[in-house]
Image (tube, rainbow, N blue to C red):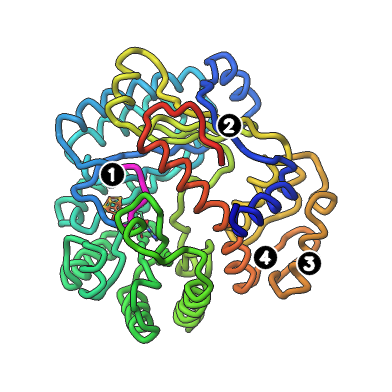
C-alpha cells in the first residue's frame, strides 16, 4: 500500500469511523425509497445527457458519440425514469435543476425539449434551469433554441483562449471561433453565463495564464470556473502521462496559478469567489450544479443522494435504455451511509462552497457542530485557513479554500477514478470498494 493510500485510509477512519466504503449492487426497493422521500422537504434534480460529438482526451465524464437514433431511444427511457419518480416526489418542490453531460446541447433538436416538458408536467419545479453546452453549439439559432427551452443559466466548456492549448486538448475550434461564441452568449441575456476554463496545462506559463484571464474579464463573462487539468487514469491523457495529480510541483504550480486568477478577478472588486474554482461577478446569481443537499439524478450515470443512501445508475447507455424498456429501474450500485459518513459528506460539500453555517449543520443533524468538528476549525484558524468565524458562520480564506480542497481531492479524484472507471467498463458491477 502506498503512502498516499495509507494516509487516505487514516483520514477516512478519523472522519467517518469506517475502514472502507463499498458500493454494492443492492438496488433499493420502491417501498424503501418511498420511506426516504417522506421526510424530505425539497430536493434537487440532475439530468445527465451522455452524448458528445467527439471524445476529449482528458475528460472523465460518462459519454459516448452522439447518434440520433440512440438519442431518440434515450429520450423515451428518461421519460420512463421520470414516471417512476413522479409517484415518489408527489408535489414536493424541486428547488434546483441542473442538466449536465457529456454535452446536453447535442440533444437540442432531438429530444431535450420533450424531456423538459415531461419533467415540468410531472414534478413541482420551483427553480431555474442550469445547463451545460459546447461552444460549437452556440450559433445564433442554437442560442434562440436554448432560450426557448427556458434555460436561464448557461455554461460552456471554453477550456482555453489560446490555439496552442486548444490543440493540445484536441478541442474542435480555434481561439477566434470560441471568442465569437462567448460574445454571442454574453449578449443573450442569461441570468448567469459561465465559462469553464482549464489551467495548469502542459508547459503553460504564468504569463500566458495572466493574458487569458484578463481577456475573460474584458469579455464581460458573468462567471469563470477555472479548473486545473486533472489526470484521470482511465482517460487518454491519464493513460499516457506520468504526471500524477499529487505531484508536489504540480500542486504548487496550481496554487500559484490560482493566485494569479484571484488577483485578476478580485481586481476592481468586480468578482467574488463562489466555489473552490469559480469566480462570479458581484450581484449575479452563481451558476452551479445542484445546490441543495439532497438530490435525484436521472439518466445514464445519474447519481442520487437521499440522506443515508447514495446510489448511481448504470453508466452504459444501451443497458440504461434496455432496463427502462423492461419496466425496471436502471440503478447499478448503492452505498448506505452511516451518520458519520453523512456528516463527512456534508462538510466536504461546504468546504467546496467555501463556507457554511453551524446552524445549518444543527438543522440537518440535530447535533452541535462544535462537538463534532469544533477542534478542526480551531486548528484551521491557527493555520490561517479561516477568514471569518462569527460563532455561526465560517468562511474559509483563499489559502484555506485551496489547501483544504487539495486534501479533499486526495479522496475525490481517487473515488471518481474507481467508481467511474469501473462503471464505464462494467454496466452492472458486483461492487466497487472506495
Ligand atoms: C461536461 S464538460 C462541459 C460541457 C461540454 N461537454 C464541453 O466540453 O464544452 C465539463 C467541464 O469539466 C472540465 N473538465 C473536464 N475534464 C477535466 C479534467 N481532466 N481536468 C480539469 N477539468 C476538466 C472542463 O472544463 C469541461 O468543460
Ligand atoms: S469535455 Fe465535453 S465535449 Fe469533451 S468529451 Fe467531455 S463532455 Fe464531451
Cβ of mark 1 under 8 Å from ligand 1: the answer is yes
Q: Which of marks 3 and 4 is in front?
A: 3
Q: Nearer the viewer, residue 81 or 64?
A: 64
Identify the mark at residue 104; answer none if there is no mark.
1
Residue 223 seen in the current view: no
Q: Nearer the viewer, mark 2 or mark 4?
A: 2
Separation (CA) of disc 1 from disc 3? 43 Å
Count of labels shown? Answer: 4
Residue 248 seen in the current view: yes
**Percent position of residue 323, x then y:** 34, 19
Separation (CA) of disc 3 from disc 4? 14 Å
* Residue corresponding to mark 4: 395
Relative side of 37 to 85, left or right: right
Label 4: few (<14), some (14–19) or many (≥20) C-alpha neighbours in 10 Å: many
Q: Nearer the viewer, residue 262 or 56?
A: 56
Residue for point 56% across, 43% down = 292
* Residue corresponding to mark 2: 335
The relative height of residue 7 versus residue 281 in the rendered view (above or below) is above
Separation (CA) of disc 2 from disc 1? 28 Å
Label 1: few (<14), some (14–19) or many (≥20) C-alpha neighbours in 10 Å: many
Magenta-drawn segment: 58-63
* Residue corresponding to mark 3: 379
Q: Which of 427 and 279 is in front in this view?
A: 427
Helix, strand or loop for disc 2 = strand
The relative height of residue 28 versus residue 115 in the rendered view (above or below) is above
Main SS category, magenta section: loop
Q: Which residue lies furthest to the right in this view?
A: 371
Q: Do the residues labelled 2 and 4 touch (CB within 8 Å)?
A: no
Amino acid at each position: 500500500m502506498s503512502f498516499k493510500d495509507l494516509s487516505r485510509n487514516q483520514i477516512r477512519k478519523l472522519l467517518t469511523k469506517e475502514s472502507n466504503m463499498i458500493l454494492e449492487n443492492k438496488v433499493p426497493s420502491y417501498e424503501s425509497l418511498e420511506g426516504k422521500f417522506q421526510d424530505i422537504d425539497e430536493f434537487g434534480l440532475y439530468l445527465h445527457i451522455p452524448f458528445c460529438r467527439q471524445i476529449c482526451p482528458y475528460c472523465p465524464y460518462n459519454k459516448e458519440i452522439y447518434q440520433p437514433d440512440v438519442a431518440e431511444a434515450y429520450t423515451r427511457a428518461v421519460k420512463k425514469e421520470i414516471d417512476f419518480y413522479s409517484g415518489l416526489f408527489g408535489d414536493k418542490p424541486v428547488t434546483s435543476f441542473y442538466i449536465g453531460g457529456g454535452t446536453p446541447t447535442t440533444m437540442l433538436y432531438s429530444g431535450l425539449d420533450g424531456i423538459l416538458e415531461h419533467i415540468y408536467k410531472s414534478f413541482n419545479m420551483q427553480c431555474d434551469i442550469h445547463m451545460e453546452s459546447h461552444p460549437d453549439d452556440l450559433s445564433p439559432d442554437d442560442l434562440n433554441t436554448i432560450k426557448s427551452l427556458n434555460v436561464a443559466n448557461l455554461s460552456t466548456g471554453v477550456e482555453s483562449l489560446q490555439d496552442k492549448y486548444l490543440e493540445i486538448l484536441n478541442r474542435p475550434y480555434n481561439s477566434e471561433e470560441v471568442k465569437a461564441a462567448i460574445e454571442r452568449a454574453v449578449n443573450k441575456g442569461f441570468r448567469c453565463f459561465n465559462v469553464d476554463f482549464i489551467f495548469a496545462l502542459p508547459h503553460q506559463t504564468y504569463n500566458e495564464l495572466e493574458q487569458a484571464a484578463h481577456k475573460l474579464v474584458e469579455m464581460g463573462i458573468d462567471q469563470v470556473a477555472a479548473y486545473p487539468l486533472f489526470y484521470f487514469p482511465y482517460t487518454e491523457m491519464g493513460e499516457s502521462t506520468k504526471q500524477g495529480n499529487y505531484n508536489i510541483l504540480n500542486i504548487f504550480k496550481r496554487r500559484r496559478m490560482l493566485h494569479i486568477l484571484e488577483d485578476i478577478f478580485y481586481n476592481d472588486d468586480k468578482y467574488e469567489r463562489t466555489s473552490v474554482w469559480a469566480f462570479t461577478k458581484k450581484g449575479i446569481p452563481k451558476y452551479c450544479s445542484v445546490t441543495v443537499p439532497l438530490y435525484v439524478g436521472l439518466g445514464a450515470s445519474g447519481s442520487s443522494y437521499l440522506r443515508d443512501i447514495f446510489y448511481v445508475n448504470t453508466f452504459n447507455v444501451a443497458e440504461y435504455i434496455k432496463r427502462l424498456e423492461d419496466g425496471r429501474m436502471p440503478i447499478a450500485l448503492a452505498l448506505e451511509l452511516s451518520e458519520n459518513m453523512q456528516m463527512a459528506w456534508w462538510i466536504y460539500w461546504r468546504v467546496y462552497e467555501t463556507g457554511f453555517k453551524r446552524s445549518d449543520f444543527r438543522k440537518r443533524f440535530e447535533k452541535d457542530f462544535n462537538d463534532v468538528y469544533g477542534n478542526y476549525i480551531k486548528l484551521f484558524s491557527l493555520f490561517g485557513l479561516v477568514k471569518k468565524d462569527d460563532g455561526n458562520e465560517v468562511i474559509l480564506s483563499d489559502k484555506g479554500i485551496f489547501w483544504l480542497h487539495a486534501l479533499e481531492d486526495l479522496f475525490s479524484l481517487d473515488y471518481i477514478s474507481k467508481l467511474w472507471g469501473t462503471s464505464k467498463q462494467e454496466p452492472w458491477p458486483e461492487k466497487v470498494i472506495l
